[in-house]
Amino acid sequence: MSMTLANQQRIKIFSLLSPAYLWLTVAIFLPLSAMFYFSFLSDVPFGQKEWFYSTENYQAFFQTTTYAKLLWKSINLGLMVTGCAVLVGFPCAYVLAKSIQGRSREALFLLVILPFWSNSLVRIFSWAIVLRGNGVLEIALNTILPFEVDVNLMFSTPAIVIGLVHSYLPYVILTSYLALQAIDDNLIDAARSMGANKLTILWRIILPLSLPGLLAGAVLIFVPVVGSFMEPRILGGRVGTYFGTVIEDQFVAVFNWPLGAALSFILLAVVLIILAVASPILRRAQT
Amino acid sequence: MSGVLLTRLGKLWLLSILFFLYAPILVMAFMSFNASQYYQLPFEFSLKWYEKLALNTEILDAATRSIAIAIVTTVVATVLGTAASVALFRFEFRGKRFLQVMLFPPIAIPWLITGTAMLIFFFGIGLGRGTPSVIIGHVALAIPYVIVVVSARLATFDATLEEAARSLGANAWTVTRRVTFPWIVPGIIAGALFAFAVSFDQFVISYFLSEPGDSTLPVLIYTSIRKGFTPEINAISTIIISVSMVVMLIAARFSNFGGER
């Protein structure tokens, strides 16, 4: 029964940590490894099926331009949505952080991030009601405007972008707000007293200091948008074919799992490259 | 003068963003009380979609299943996550930084990738699709959120409180039960609410892991939308969105509890 204190502590640490990390291993890390293995198979190794190791799934990506084009289309969508969200969200975060004070600021901040915690599928569905032909947007515009307009944005790229910006906007507002709030107001006052105009202050002080937060928000938007499939399906209809929807198809419609696994891994590689590129600036945000 | 104008413009911008964020949700809620099946205006108040919803066993079953899965996920993820955050806070050991970094892949990797990977793996080990697989997946997604939220609360803990209790004669168990635990309770509640929201709103993972006749509410909504719009989906969506917003409001209150005061 002679147990050293160090040993006792080790057992404590182990028993506290291992359930959570074991769960993560079984449900996240082993599946990712299994998928990597799968992406090198010719067919699913279940039942009586014949299969062998091959790189044909990766070759499929490089042989035709179809998949590469779709990946590029998804990356483009990611850039578009991220750009819109940053342009719309940063000024919003700035107003919240610098021109509104006290209780109303807290309340408004909560209002901005609250929709984020509601079901994303339901929010996309609500856009479908607003945007479709003879929908709410069209009726509203026709009531306000003196002339008749025909608005049917449903099943178009703008509809997808609007829906996705709506889904992910709270991210960029949240991260930018936290970064902007950390900027010392004295710094801005000092610059102003030395004759800097508003544009100079924005360009030389506010933007550089809040860049890590802004970028964190941008990454948080870009990554899920590149992998999105539900939003393009519902709002895009026939124009909504993206890299994500092709992967979805491999698993739920075509049942070519090895190809789906390979495409998933290519997507993961893209995501990891983006995270790696952004990480030096993001690390500044943490400290 | 221009400064005032700019501030006003800024506030106007903020208000328009709020309008953009809430308008579609309000339109949907509004339409769930509209009699027309094709969302036609003029508006005619009716509760018929809610009445139809009350009789739609498919939707109600899916809703019950979603709530049950969310409750199981919340309990398991909160217990495992809290234990892990206590260990990460209390002890210094080799590999701690690595374990903290390991929390990010489940959050950062697109769910499409995680979901398809789980599908392959669960089929590979013979578990296949179904509610157990869905729960395993949901718990894994919720654990990192619980750890992050509870750790944030623990970080505000003043260790001298424990020392004080110990110097007054409390043993280790009493210190944990009477000093440490009460302090982190708001963090645990907030973490639990996050876990519930993560599970209840989760669509992608459930979509790949649930059995066709046995789907969760978001999965059922997705398939219904793709088959054609039905106002009953409107009614259930309105209910879901109100419930999750109330839950998150409560969570926000709890997670703020010790931070500012």
Image (tube, coloured by chain):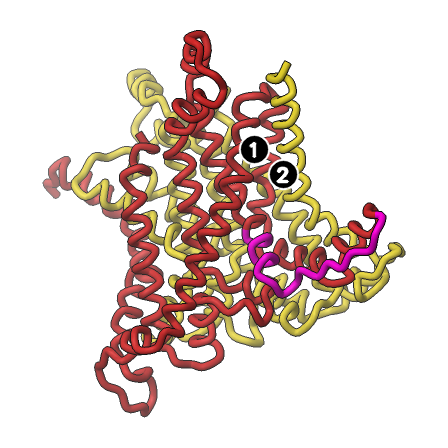
Chain colours: A red, B yellow
Q: Chain of mark 1?
A: A
Visible residue check, residue A175: yes
| Residue carrying label 2 | B17
Give the total of numbered labels.
2
Task: Say if A183 sits above or below B237 in the image.
Answer: above
Q: Residues within 10 Å of mark 1 (few under 14, many from 20)?
A: many
What amino acid does circle 2 point to?
Ile
Q: Quadrant of the N terminus of chain A?
A: top left
Distance from the alpha carbon under mark 1 to that under mark 2:
8 Å
Q: Quadrant of residue B215?
A: bottom right
Type of amino acid at the residue the image marks with label 1: Cys
Residues beneath discs 1 and 2 located on the same chain = no
The residue labelled by disc 1 is A92
Q: Which mark is residue B216?
A: none
Residue at the spot x=48%, y=60% of the render?
A228
Q: Residue at x 33, y 60 (%)?
A: A268
Which of these two is toward me, B165 or B158? B158
Quick check: can you spot residue B177?
no
Is disc 1 in contact with disc 2, using a CB cutoff of under 8 Å? yes
Can you say whether A190 is above or below A34 in the image? above
The picture places residue A256, in percent across and down from the top left corner, at 39, 80
- In the foreground, A75 or B147: A75
For numbered disc 2, what is the local secondary structure?
helix
Mark 1, secondary structure of its residue: helix
Q: Is residue A159 magenta?
A: yes
Q: Quadrant of the C terminus of chain A?
A: top left
Callout 2: chain: B
Tell me the magenta residue range: A146-164
Between residues A105 and B170, which one lies in front from this camera angle? Answer: A105
